[in-house]
Amino acid sequence: MIPTTKEETAPKTKPKTMIAYWFSRDDGTTEHQKTPAEVGKTDRSDGTPAPCEKGLHASPTPFDALQYAAGCRLWEVEIPADSVPHGDPLDKYAAKSRRYLRSVDLRRVLVEFSCRQAEGVLDLFEKRYPDGKRPREAIEAAREYAKKQTHNVRAAAEAARAAAGAAEAMLNEMALSALLSDEGGTA
């Protein structure tokens, strides 16, 4: 077959870089990266990249990057196309370099997402513990914090800790109930 269009006759070249995503703390650092990220800056890593061991990490989507988030600042980054993939399905890369293109603080978005997820199971808790107000109060405190970005983190942390304790107690009780209701379960 004879090529008939410009696209068919153009040489096929692989891209040298790809766009990926990475989270940092507000100051652009993480536990493993002490030098802050800055828009336009490129960080480099010596040696051969290996996921979870060596190299500069980034993920194919913001959602994938979230599981490795060190903070609420999301960065769009450029990494070499030959970066080493990790996971099945793919959830991150280890790269020799990472160029910071732009960033955004997703604190409010992430807090709201977390609140909505918690609300999705809140009715299970409230049916089992009708007087248990701590999870709902924790959700309200988190939303208040995100809305006002107040520095009253202590109140939000105490409410979150109380909600986590209540949720853990509920989970333990439900697990024990399931074990005891199983055939052969004994107290």
Image (tube, grey):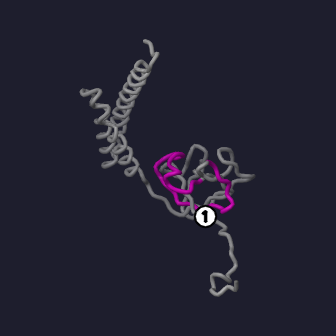
Of all residues, the one furthest to the top in this rendering is: 187
Q: Quadrant of residue 42?
A: bottom right
Q: According to the image, label 1 marks what residue?
A: 18
The residue under the point 67% across, 70% down is 14
Q: Position of residue 57 (x, y in %)?
A: 61, 52
The residue under the point 54% across, 53% down is 22
Span shown in magenta: 58-87
Q: Amino acid at mark 1?
A: Met
Q: Residues within 10 Å of mark 1 (few under 14, many from 20)?
A: few
- In the image, residue 154 above or below residue 21: above
Between residue 57 and residue 119, name the one nearer to us.
119
The residue under the point 35% across, 27% down is 166
Q: Position of residue 62 (x, y in %)?
A: 50, 55
- In the image, residue 143 above or below residue 38: above
Is 24 contained in the magenta span?
no
Question: Relative to 27, is 181 on the left or the right?
Answer: left
Residue 78 showing in the rendered view: yes
